Amino acid sequence: MAASTHRSSIVHSVLASVRDAALSGEARAARESSRAISSELPLTFDDAYRAHFAFVWRSAKRLGVSDAALDDVVQEVFVIVHRRLADFEGRSSLKTWLFGITLRVARDHRRAVKRRPADTTVDPDALGAPGGPAHDAEKAEAVRLLYAILDEMDDERREVFVMAELEQMPMPEIAEGLGMNVNTAYARLRSARQLFEQSVARHRARDEWRLR
């Protein structure tokens, strides 16, 4: 029981650090901007781009797009947004709609390239956050660990984990965005959480062993 509680504490710490990082710097400004325009329809393309560029960028990266292709993938997402924004009716949140486009573009990218090795580049959302060098180093390590584990997941679990745990989207919107029923989405999330917890424990144990 004690070991299980310790693992859960570590998992919570990793996810909390990553979520906190996503609210810093550019991402924080985007989140505040999105609140300001969330109830205004129709939106302009400039509104959507300013408010959600950071969200689209980090979502594409978390969905497995390589660093070398990120700029092209994000550009493709916003080309589609520019073309289709007039059709957005507000039946889901703009964030969910944008994630759906990002997801489809990221899937196409993953099909076009061989599965890459774990990319441990630090998420720029984790840089420049207040708290000093030690605090930044802790967040950078959490982000490194996150991406290493995400690269171990299959696409089905990775997608629902990113949407639920990292972007904290409502499960009905996740299910709709992934084209499945809510029960299936919950089942995939439970499986992804279990894999994530096991992977965190394994990576931490390996790191502790190396430091001996």
Image (tube, rainbow, N blue to C red):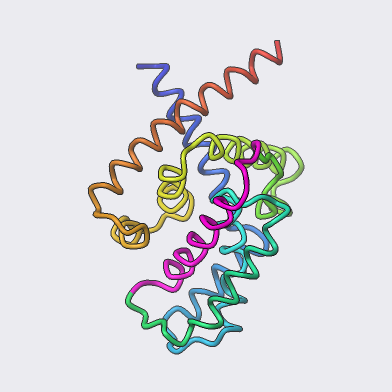
Using the image, determine if residue 203 lies above or below residue 47. Answer: above
Q: Of helix, strand and loop, which mostly describes the magenta segment? A: helix
Using the image, determine if residue 28 lies above or below residue 122. Answer: below
- The residue drawn where x is 32% and y is 59% is 179
- The residue drawn where x is 72% and y is 39% is 137
- Image quadrant in which you'd find residue 56: bottom right
- The residue drawn where x is 61% and y is 83% is 46
- The residue drawn where x is 51% and y is 23% is 201
Q: Does the magenta stretch include residue 104?
A: yes
- Image quadrant in which you'd find residue 178: bottom left
- Image quadrant in which you'd find residue 54: bottom right
- Locate residue 176, reporting x and y percent: 31, 62
Point out the stretch of residues depicted in magenta. 92-118
From the viewer's perspective, tell me whether residue 143 is left or right of residue 185: right
From the viewer's perspective, tell me whether residue 124 is left or right of residue 41: right
- Locate residue 94, reporting x and y percent: 44, 73
**Nearest to the observer: residue 159 or residue 212:** 159
